[in-house]
């Protein structure tokens, strides 16, 4: 009898420990997502199609969430200035099309052409954050918004001539939306794609993210990566150890900006078009929320946080409007999507100081 009681207590303690480790809010979100998947067939929604949609959105957004990791490790906080990197990626994309690159080469060249912009803007952004230590996340928000607003002017003034991008009547100024057909549309999504009936797994996109995630994990275990973590965890100790704090912080910002530039290119190839002007304005918020929902804090983030958070966030945003529409037989997908996504963003940001536990 006493042995059974001890065993039940042990199981109860283990269960509590597992819940505490994973985090109750994340467990609730995961449970809600699982419920949506279970409900899908009963309301007339194709289960495997929704799994495919969730995997697609996960693979398109994961790199931008990964961009949060280096700045969190260096103590610069969550990168609300993500649009700065996104703008770099957009410049790389438009220049790749302008120079006439097509197919997979246009994607490679978009990354190559975006890199100098990401490095230069990252250096300036990092210098600015070093000047205002302690208020990084607030200033980063203004930097991101300002970059998007400034680029709205440049998209009209830059001397692009490609007929696939400029306004038809004026012959100058870039369009709001540019099709990637014939360029790098689905270049990763169609590579190593796995089809099992209605289930489609975008192997190339997931592999591309996995390679970047592994590279980030490997970097964080190098001498420089360890120094970056030390700067974020204990700046006083890092300084006493002879680490150049400002230099490490700038490096983390450059890495984050470059990953954001690559991330928007991965996002574009999935959707099949480039969106300019105000499109990147709020793109930092879903990425920040995803990594927080995954269990990160403003001082600590891991690749696991990126994977879990992106899947949960994109899964909820994908599944909720589809299942709700099928239940109430009304087309309210966009309204439901806005309510759910903004609700999750608000929930995550109110816990930015302690993460979701």
Image (cartoon, rainbow, N blue to C red):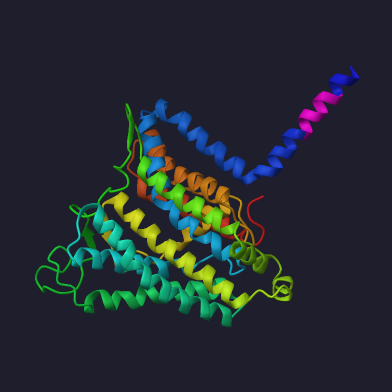
Q: Quadrant of the N terminus?
A: top right
64 lies left or right of 239: left
Picture quadrant of residue 110: bottom left
141 lies left or right of 181: right
Q: Position of residue 116 (x, y in %)?
A: 37, 72
Picture quadrant of residue 238: bottom right
Q: Residue furthest bottom?
A: 131
Q: Residue furthest right?
A: 2
Q: Position of residue 32 (x, y in %)?
A: 54, 38
Q: Is residue 278 above or below residue 132?
A: above
Q: Residue at x 77, y 28 (%)?
A: 11
Q: For the stretch drawn in magenta, what is the main secondary structure?
A: helix
146 lies left or right of 96: right
Viewer-proximal residue, 92 or 180? 92
Q: Residue furthest front?
A: 223
Viewer-proximal residue, 343 or 47? 47
Count of number-bearing discs: 0
Picture quadrant of residue 87: bottom left
Q: Position of residue 78 (x, y in %)?
A: 55, 64
139 lies left or right of 323: right
Q: Position of residue 286 (x, y in %)?
A: 47, 57
Q: Residue at x 52, y 80 (%)?
A: 127
Residue 7 can be seen, yes or no: yes
Q: Residue at x 42, y 52 (%)?
A: 61
Q: Residue at x 30, y 42 (%)?
A: 191
Residue 347 can be seen, yes or no: no
Q: Is residue 325 above or below residue 3?
A: below
Indicate yes or no whether the magenta region holds residue 162: no
Q: Is residue 75 above or below residue 338?
A: below
Magenta residues (range): 6-13
Indicate yes or no whether the magenta region holds residue 8: yes
């Amino acid at each position: 009898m006493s042995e059974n009681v001890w065993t039940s207590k042990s199981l109860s303690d283990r269960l509590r420990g597992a819940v505490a480790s994973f985090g109750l809010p994340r467990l609730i979100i995961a449970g809600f997502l699982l419920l949506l998947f279970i409900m899908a067939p009963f309301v007339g929604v194709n289960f495997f199609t929704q799994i495919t949609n969730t995997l697609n959105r996960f693979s398109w957004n994961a790199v931008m969430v990964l961009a949060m990791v280096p700045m969190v490790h260096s103590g610069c906080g969550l990168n609300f200035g993500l649009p700065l990197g996104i703008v770099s990626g957009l410049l790389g994309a438009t220049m790749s099309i302008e120079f006439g690159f097509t197919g997979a080469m246009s994607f490679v060249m978009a990354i190559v052409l975006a890199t100098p912009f990401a490095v230069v803007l990252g250096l300036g952004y990092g210098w600015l954050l070093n000047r205002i230590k302690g208020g990084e996340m607030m200033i980063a928000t203004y930097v991101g918004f300002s970059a998007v607003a400034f680029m709205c002017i440049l998209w009209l003034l830059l001397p692009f001539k490609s007929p696939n991008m400029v306004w038809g009547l004026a012959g100058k100024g870039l369009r709001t939306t540019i099709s990637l057909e014939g360029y790098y549309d689905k270049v990763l999504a169609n590579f190593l794609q796995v089809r099992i009936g209605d289930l489609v797994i975008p192997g190339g996109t997931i592999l591309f993210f996995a390679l970047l995630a592994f590279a980030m994990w490997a970097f964080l275990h190098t001498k420089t990566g360890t120094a970056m973590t030390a700067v974020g965890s204990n700046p006083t100790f890092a300084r006493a150890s002879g680490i150049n704090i400002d230099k490490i912080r700038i490096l983390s910002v450059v890495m984050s900006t470059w990953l954001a530039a690559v991330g928007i290119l991965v996002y574009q190839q999935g959707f099949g078009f480039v969106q300019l002007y105000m499109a990147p304005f709020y793109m930092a918020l879903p990425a920040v929320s995803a990594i927080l929902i995954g269990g990160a804090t403003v001082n600590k983030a891991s690749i696991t946080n990126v994977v879990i958070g992106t899947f949960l966030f994109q899964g909820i945003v994908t599944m909720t409007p589809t299942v709700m529409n099928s239940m109430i037989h009304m087309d309210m997908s966009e309204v439901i999507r806005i309510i759910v996504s903004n609700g999750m963003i608000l929930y995550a940001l109110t816990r930015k100081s302690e993460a979701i536990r």
